[in-house]
Image (tube, rainbow, N blue to C red):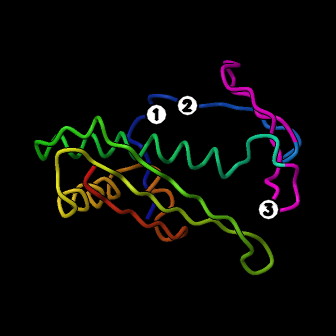
Amino acid sequence: MTNTPEKIVYTARATVTGGREGRAVSEDGILDLSLTAPKEVGGPGTGTNPEQLFAVGYGACFQGALTMVAKKHGVDASGSELEISVGFGPEGESFAITADIVARIPGVDDAKAQELVDAAHQVCPYSKATRGNVPVTVTGKAA
């Protein structure tokens, strides 16, 4: 199933040169990063890598979805804290990723936290984009 926005309200643009050993710059110049492969895959590990960027982007998006969903349930999740792990490894003749999200939500028990992250996982654009292709686990915990 394809999830297409009804209207594009923002478009992020960036230029990447050199792949894992290069540079990434957003169109507005605010993001300007040296990219290097992690030591675990033979790189120097001295810069940012694509998996870190994906983890940060997914985490920020997921927290927005969580806050929105929680508000509908009468819960203030603005103080929640997310830990996002993005795994990278061989898959057949190429590579693949996994994602694990753990959200600690203040003011609720573990069961309610899990209910909220499950609901957020249904509406988060990153979750929609990865669904059916990237193994993603979401875990909600009381803070």
Q: Cβ–Cβ below 8 Å for labels 1 and 2?
A: yes
Q: Is residue 78 above or below residue 62?
A: above
* Residue occupied by mark 2: 11
Disc 3/disc 1 C-alpha distance (Å): 38 Å
Point out the frontmost of discs 1 and 2: 2
Q: Residue at x 59, y 59 (%)?
A: 86
Q: Residue at x 79, y 40 (%)?
A: 47
Question: Which region shows up in magenta?
Answer: 22-44
Using residue 83 as the reference point, say whether residue 20 is left or right of it: right
Q: Residue at x 19, y 64 (%)?
A: 111
Secondary structure at numbered mark 3: helix
Point out the frontmost of discs 3 and 1: 3
* Residue occupied by mark 3: 40
Residue 141 falls inside the magenta stretch: no
Location of residue 108 in the rendering, given as x and y in whole percent from the top left corner: 17, 51
Secondary structure at numbered mark 2: loop
Using residue 98 as the reference point, say whether residue 94 is left or right of it: right
The three-letter amino acid code for the residue at tag 3 is Glu
Specify which label sits upstream in the sequence, 3 or 2.
2
* Residue occupied by mark 1: 8
The three-letter amino acid code for the residue at tag 1 is Ile
Secondary structure at numbered mark 1: loop
| Figure disc tally | 3
